[in-house]
Image (cartoon, grey):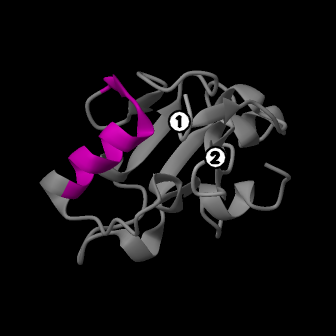
Amino acid sequence: MFGSPVLHLQGPASRFYWQLVRFSEGQIMSRKAESIPTLAAQGLLRGGTRLEVVPEFLPRGARRGDRRFTATVVSARGRQGSIRWDYDGCCYSLTTLTRMINTRYGIQWPGKTCANWQLVGDIISLWELAERFER
């Protein structure tokens, strides 16, 4: 159908990468591979990897290492239920967990979910880390 979006799989984490082409407008809009699959493909995220909210996004008075702001990767391959929140032991997608923590505790959310999180003790976000690789 003329003007319909077409999905093209490509890139290192191809199942998570798509490119939207709008034939009628002659525009190409693309989206990079998601950060978690990119980092998993590089061996940087796997089950058991510990994550924390980037310290600058913590609410006033919160301290680094507080279980409300830490999580553990269960599976870097999936989305739903791939992250275990250290506070309640339940599994969520990273976006759902970030939304919950934002609503309950007031962390800042810069717009990209993976920009909120970093490997425990690291100094750059998962998003920034993933940007170092082709995606």
Disc assigned to residue 38: none
Q: In this view, does 86 lie to the left or right of 100?
A: right
34 to 102, vertically: above or below = above
Q: In the image, what residue type sits under mark 1? A: Ser
Q: In the image, what residue type sits under mark 2? A: Phe
Residue 23 coordinates in the image, percent (x, y): 64, 46
Residue to which mark 2 is pinned: 23
- Specify start and end residues of the magenta stretch as a single range: 89-102
Q: In which quarter of the image is the N terminus?
A: top right
- Residue visible at 31% across and 23% down in the picture: 90
Residue to which mark 1 is pinned: 4
For residue 6, say whether it is visible.
yes
Q: Is mark 2 on a helix, strand or loop?
A: loop
For residue 121, say whether it is visible.
no
**Do the CB atoms of the residues marked 1 and 2 lie less than 8 Å apart?**
yes
Q: Mark 1 or mark 2, which has the lower sequence index? A: 1
Q: Does the magenta stretch include residue 64?
A: no
Q: Tell me the quarter of the picture where residue 3 sits.
A: top right
Q: In this view, does 88 lie to the left or right of 103?
A: right
Which of 40 and 10 lies nearest the eye of the viewer?
10
Q: Is residue 59 left or right of residue 45?
A: left
Which of 72 and 20 lies nearest the eye of the viewer?
20
119 to 91, vertically: above or below = below
